[in-house]
Image: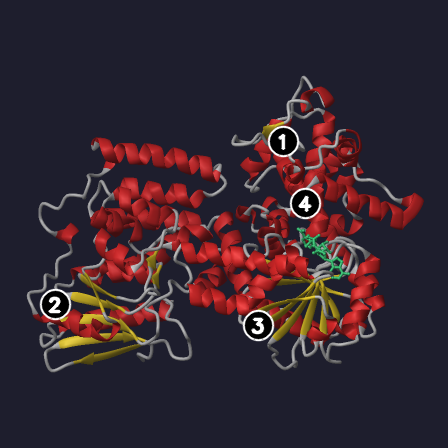
């Protein structure tokens, strides 16, 4: 029975295929909808009374893309390249049938059309797009490890030429209505309420049911293949740029550009077949599995608050208090006001509080200048932030986030002062980066309402918030903390209390490994470049400079003082100590660290490094440096899992990718172990423990797990 596509025919003999999946806010292309579409096309083709058809959507958007959950579920059963090929070829075949059935098809694109949704439009003979800024067109498949598998790599280049098509296919460049029209991707743009009529007008005029590439004498705009100098150059430059940006960690962009190159020098049907073959290879590969699972399925579930304790009423923060208007407090104020909350921004003196508010002003001025916001909207947002030094102003706050100096005493003091004025049922959250939440909660009269909300810097850009559950934190506090994270449109992970929690603890192992290698005589340029080749955003020495060596120094000295004689310094701490205590090279903010920052020039590694840590004559292979960096982080994550800091592999993966940029091709720190295979992982750690030290030692728990060959994900 048809229930996702409503099929009607009007008195002019024009059929309308209205796609409207019941019970969903968005249309997505599922197997079911494709079957129904196929049946509708047959009906149009077979009915002599039907002159042509319009495809339209019953939702606010057109079609968001293919149903990835269906694809990922299919992966759970272990997709072979042949099955992946078949999946793509089936969808592509239905679109091709529509394109060649002899009847004209127009599409009324009322809103967003991505992936398979956009590919469906490309297979129609006429495209009318709503004049609506939300009506963007795009092919984002590469961002989750796939390629457009329903004709996107074939029809778009044939329509607009390779040069214009590649950024859409390879970089996920989205097209707004005006751009789409200028590029020739759509035939016209029209007000939303006129779309259907315009499409029908075309069908009733003199419609051509033959796609340009099926017409006799068709030539690719700008030429195809290696025989046209300009196109040949596009491919040469394109492939080298891809190699440089992906470092060969991501197969999808290379497969996509290959599909364009090989497919566009053949007739369309062969091109579609080539595309499906590449699709089959990608979808059955481990990188696509990792990316779809972590970036789409698990992130989607986290955004929908998969970890929210059940049975607690949904909450909304209307008034938020922030203690400390420094770098973090100011950023938290901005993202909260942006979500419509009233924000009280408290500091010890008014000047500091005002400075915190001015941070938002700076960001908003930039947004207005670039046309992302208007003066009125910016002012309305600024009006929501109230700088103060008076605790009474916190009255009525449903949530207070503390972001004062990293000192137990100061944090205890502001906790007590705040609790004296906020409502009894308010939640108190600390943004500490290192101090265990359970300890900080001792300063609270209501430890059940005390949680950690660990933001990342810069707050307005970083998508993650790590919610830390203290020993006494209640389910209600967790639920309300998660509701707030959703309100400010960030992605949450939930972790249990422990020094460094999850993200800081694991991230520190990566920088420490870099410093340890430096001290061992590994060439610093090799360390930095190997990190980038692994897919990390920057090398460990550059990262250390960014967060400042001083911070690393202070955190370690505090931990050492807290723990006393038993404290074991990390293997690379000697380097930090030397740089801070002896050399006064404390990091980028101080003008010098592992790098020099000459004014007006690019930063470069400090030449003095070579004297301090002379590079060994025999340098390790690049892959060994990469492995040390990645294995060390993955191993520490496994320990967090074993210790109960993490309850779910998804939190580990999402936290690592969105918190500190662990390479997305791996799927995240725990997916990385599954990717290399747990048994191989353990034997490599054993080898590294022998070669580099006990920080690579594997626990009995992990070894036993490897003995059972038990992956972190069962699918
Ligand atoms: P910061 O030094 O930029 O700001 C701290 C602010 O707190 C200052 O404006 C200071 O005047 C104010 N303050 C100090 N004592 C106060 C008091 N008694 N009452 C009210 N205000 C007071 O520091 P930051 O980088 O914003 O860090 C704040 C907290 O966030 C720390 O706990 C830090 O560990 C944590 N954190 C920092 C980062 C980061 O990248 N900087 C990331 C995550 C978490």
Q: Which residue is mark 1?
A: 595
Mark 4 vs mark 2, foreground winner is 2
Indicate which disc, 1 or 2, sits on the residue closer to the N terminus: 2
In this rendering, does residue 80 appear at all?
no
Residue 341's tag is 3
- State the quadrant of the N terminus: bottom left
Indicate which disc, 4 or 3, sits on the residue closer to the N terminus: 3
Q: Residue furthest right?
A: 565
- Report if the beta carbon of the residue with label 2 is closer than 8 angstroms to ligand 1: no
Indicate which disc, 1 or 4, sits on the residue closer to the N terminus: 1
Mark 2 Cα-neighbour bin, 10 Å: few <14, some 14–19, many ≥20: some
> 27 or 698, which is in the foreground?
27
Helix, strand or loop status at disc 1 = strand
Residue 633's tag is 4
Mark 1 Cα-neighbour bin, 10 Å: few <14, some 14–19, many ≥20: many
Q: Which residue is mark 2?
A: 202
Mark 3 Cα-neighbour bin, 10 Å: few <14, some 14–19, many ≥20: many
């Amino acid at each position: 029975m048809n229930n996702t596509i409503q099929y009607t025919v009007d008195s002019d003999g024009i059929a309308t295929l209205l796609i409207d999946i019941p019970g969903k806010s968005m249309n997505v292309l599922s197997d079911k909808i494709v079957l129904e579409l196929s049946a509708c096309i047959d009906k149009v083709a077979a009915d002599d009374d039907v002159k042509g058809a319009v495809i339209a959507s019953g939702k606010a958007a057109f079609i968001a893309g293919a149903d990835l959950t269906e694809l990922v579920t299919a992966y759970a059963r272990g997709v072979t390249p042949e099955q992946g090929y078949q999946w793509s070829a089936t969808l592509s075949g239905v679109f091709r049938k529509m394109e060649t059935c002899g009847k004209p098809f127009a599409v009324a694109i009322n809103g967003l059309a991505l992936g398979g949704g956009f590919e469906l439009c490309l297979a129609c003979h006429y495209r009318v797009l709503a004049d609506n800024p939300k009506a963007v067109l795009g092919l984002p498949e590469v961002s989750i490890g796939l390629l457009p598998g329903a004709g996107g790599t074939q029809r778009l280049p044939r329509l607009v030429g390779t040069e214009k098509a590649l950024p859409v296919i390879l970089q996920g460049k989205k097209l707004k209505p005006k751009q789409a029209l200028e590029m020739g991707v759509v035939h016209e743009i029209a007000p939303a309420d006129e779309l259907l009529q315009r499409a029908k007008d075309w069908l009733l005029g003199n419609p051509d049911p033959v796609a340009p590439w099926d017409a006799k004498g068709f030539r690719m705009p700008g030429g195809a293949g290696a025989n046209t100098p300009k196109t040949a150059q596009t491919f040469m430059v394109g492939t080298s740029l891809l190699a440089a940006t992906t470092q060969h960690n991501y197969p999808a962009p290379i497969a996509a550009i290959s599909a364009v190159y090989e497919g566009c020098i053949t007739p369309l049907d062969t091109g579609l077949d080539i595309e499906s073959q590449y699709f089959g290879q990608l979808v059955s590969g481990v990188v696509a599995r990792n990316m779809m699972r972590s970036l789409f399925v698990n992130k989607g579930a986290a955004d929908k608050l998969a970890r929210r304790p059940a049975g607690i009423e949904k909450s909304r923060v209307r008034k938020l208090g922030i203690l400390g208007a420094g770098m973090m407090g100011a950023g938290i104020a901005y993202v909260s006001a942006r979500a419509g909350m009233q924000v009280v921004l408290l500091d010890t003196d008014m000047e500091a509080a005002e400075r915190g508010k001015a941070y938002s002003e700076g960001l908003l001025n930039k947004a207005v200048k670039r046309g992302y916001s208007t003066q009125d909207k910016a002012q309305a947002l600024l009006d929501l932030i109230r700088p103060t030094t008076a605790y009474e102003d916190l009255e009525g706050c449903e949530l207070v986030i503390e972001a004062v100096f990293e000192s137990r005493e100061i944090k205890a003091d502001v906790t007590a002062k705040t609790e004296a004025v906020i409502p009894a049922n308010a939640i108190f959250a600390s943004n500490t980066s290192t101090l265990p939440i359970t300890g900080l909660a001792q300063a609270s009269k209501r430890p059940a309402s005390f949680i950690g909300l660990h933001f990342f810097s810069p707050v307005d850009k970083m998508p993650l918030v790590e919610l830390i559950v203290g020993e006494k934190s209640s389910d209600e506090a967790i639920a309300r903390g998660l509701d707030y994270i959703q309100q400010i449109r960030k992605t949450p992970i939930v972790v249990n209390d422990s020094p460094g929690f999850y993200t800081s603890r694991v991230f520190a192992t990566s920088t420490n490994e870099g410093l340890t290698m430096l001290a061992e005589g590994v060439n610093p340029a090799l360390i930095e470049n190997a990190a980038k080749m692994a897919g990390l955003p920057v090398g460990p020495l550059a990262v250390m400079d960014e967060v400042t060596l001083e911070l690393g120094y202070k955190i370690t000295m505090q931990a050492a003082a807290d723990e006393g004689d038993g404290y074991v310094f990390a293997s690379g701490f000697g380097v930090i100590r030397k740089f801070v205590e002896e050399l006064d090279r404390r990091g980028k903010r101080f003008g010098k660290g592992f790098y020099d920052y000459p004014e007006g020039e690019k930063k470069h590694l400090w030449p003095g490094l070579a004297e301090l840590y002379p590079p060994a004559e025999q340098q390790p292979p690049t892959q060994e440096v990469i492995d040390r960096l990645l294995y060390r982080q993955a191993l520490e994550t496994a320990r967090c899992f074993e210790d109960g800091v993490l309850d779910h592999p998804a939190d580990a993966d999402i936290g690592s990718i969105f918190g500190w940029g662990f390479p997305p091709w791996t799927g995240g720190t725990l997916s990385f172990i599954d990717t290399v295979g747990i048994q191989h992982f353990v034997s490599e750690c054993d080898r590294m423990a022998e070669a580099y030290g006990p920080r690579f030692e594997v626990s009995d728990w992990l070894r036993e797990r490897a003995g059972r060959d038990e992956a972190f994900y069962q699918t």
